[in-house]
Amino acid sequence: MSKAVSALGGVTWTDGIATVHEAPLQGMITVRGDLTSKGVIKAATGATGMQMPAQGTANCNGTKGLCWMSPDELLVLCAYGDVAQVLDGMRAALGDQHGLAVDVSDARALFRVAGKGALEVMAKLAPVDFRPSAFGHGMFRRSRLAQVPAAFWMQEDDAFHVVCFRSQAQYVFDLLKAAGQKGSEVSIF
Amino acid sequence: MLILTCPCCGQTGEETEFHAGGEAHLKRYGPGSSDIEFEGYMFMRENPKGVHFERWRHVYGCGKWFHAARCTMTLEVFGTYPAQTLSPPQELRDKISEKRPGWSWRDFA
């Protein structure tokens, strides 16, 4: 087996109004199904120990979490090395109920944008209302960053987690760097 | 710029997060239909100045289709509603009537 590496090898950029850091490999499992069905809830909560997230939110703690992607889709976060084991558990919990759980860890890249300017950096790139009254802790949003799809949430203050497709990781990293250039604060928030 | 709220995931975004899917509430006429019916289904479209109904897809979000009612002249969005319906909900029609008295669109008013 070859050694698994993240898209950009854990690159970090600190020369701007926010720091951009590519997170190490993160286990990600996509769950499709009726999010109100017992089997799906049992599979998702059992895998992470987290509560089911409400619409448009994410319950995350460290590398574990549950993110609400759409009315019939959930993103399950877990440690990269545990994915196979977690998947087995989830499939067992689903039983014969309709649902789908698939490992997508290697199809994605995860960035962490942190610092005082993180909010500004994100607001420059995504057509999303980032005012603190509209977007805060625990909220989860799928949208776009410039020209590519991305999903993001705030796990702690002034820090965003950004998930994008692995093939677009370099593009997203460059975008975040460009939007985070020194002296480019808009100071709108 | 249109500000749309997806009725499936409840998120509000501007139009670049969505994709327009053409006119709403088209009835398909397939094999066995008359040429006139098929022509109407295939080519005939409303081109209103004012109230219009369209299909949209939340392409960068939840990926779901939905319907939107808007004004083509002012770009005001009257509302959005789920795709699983054959006509706009009465509530939305009443709301449009308040703002654009006497409006009509195809068979709806």
Image (tube, coloured by chain):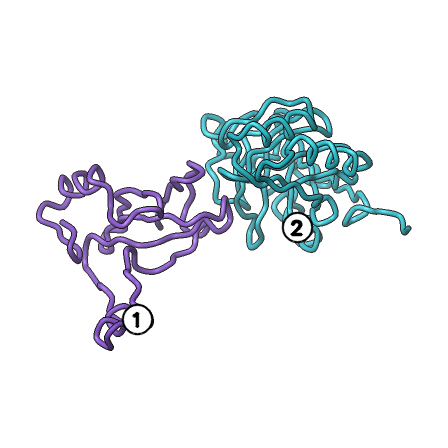
Chain colours: A cyan, B purple
| A22 relative to A114, above or below | below
Q: Chain of mark 1?
A: B
Q: Chain of mark 2?
A: A
Left or right: A100 with respect to A10? left
Q: Outermost residue, front direction?
A: A96
Badge 1 crowding class, 10 Å Cα cut-off, few under 14, some 14 to 19, many 20 or more, is some
Q: Position of residue B80 (x, y in %)?
A: 32, 43
The amino acid type, in three-letter code, at marker 2 is Phe
The residue singled out by tag 2 in the image is A165
Q: Residue at x 54, y 48 (%)?
A: A144
Compare residues A10 and A54 and report the one nearer the observer: A54
The residue singled out by tag 1 in the image is B42
Q: Position of residue B91 (x, y in %)?
A: 21, 37
Report the Cα–Cα distance between label 1 and label 2.
37 Å
Q: Is residue B76 visible?
A: yes
Judge if badges 1 and 2 mark residues of a common chain: no
Label 1 element class: helix
| B104 relative to B38, above or below | above
Question: Foreground mark, 1 or 2?
Answer: 1
